Image (spheres, rainbow, N blue to C red):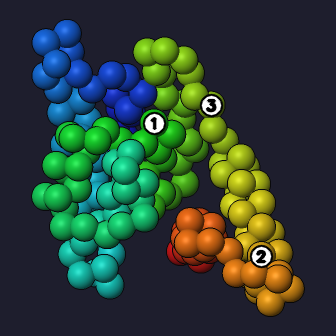
Amino acid sequence: MTYDRSWIGRNRYNEFKYLTEEYKIGVNDFFKFACDHRDPEDGGLIRCPCEDCANKYFKDPSDVKVDLYLNGIMKWYTKWDLHGERDMPRVEAETSSRNIHYRDEDMYDARDMLRDFVDANEHFENFEEEPNAKAQAFYEMVAASIHE
């Protein structure tokens, strides 16, 4: 089944600051798809593609739905490949303020750049002092994102 993804790039709120019907239907379509394609090894959890979690965290499906309502879905996540979708090209989502264009190659280029950065900075013994707590947290976050 093919799902309409145009809701992803649009504003999720109407003029009265309520979620639009289009957004709720889109979230329900995503929710159904993600639940139907759950990996048994994930213990019934699915990745959360909300703006805050950015597919980094596995959560109970009902929590993912709440996050999508509260935080919105990532605007570029129009191919649900981390939720079991295969062999479908990423489509461009329209946004109210601008169009966001991402290609799969862009994502791989960024991942390669991050991997090079981590490899170059993985060992700090060449430095005279350890990085401060914020820098260390950043290095760990980058390392975690490319080793998923």
**Total numbered circles:** 3
Amino acid, disc 2:
Asn
Would residue 5 be visible to someone looking at this image? yes
Q: How far apart are the two marked residues, 3 and 1, measured between alpha carbons?
A: 10 Å
Question: Residue at left 24%, top 81%?
Answer: 43
Q: Residues within 10 Å of mark 3 (few under 14, many from 20)?
A: few
Q: Residues within 10 Å of mark 1 (few under 14, many from 20)?
A: many
Compared to 25, does 110 lie above or below?
A: below
Q: Quadrant of residue 63?
A: bottom left
Amino acid, disc 3:
His
Q: Is residue 127 left or right of residue 44?
A: right
Q: Residues within 10 Å of mark 2 (few under 14, many from 20)?
A: some
Along the viewing direction, whichever of 91 and 62 lies nearer the viewer: 62
Would residue 142 be visible to someone looking at this image? no
Question: Residue at left 13%, top 22%?
Answer: 18
> Mark 1 falls on what kind of element?
loop
The residue indicated by pointer 1 is 75
Amino acid, disc 1:
Lys
The residue indicated by pointer 3 is 101
Give the foreground label among 3 and 2: 2
Q: Is residue 91 left or right of residue 75?
A: right
Q: Residue furthest front?
A: 129
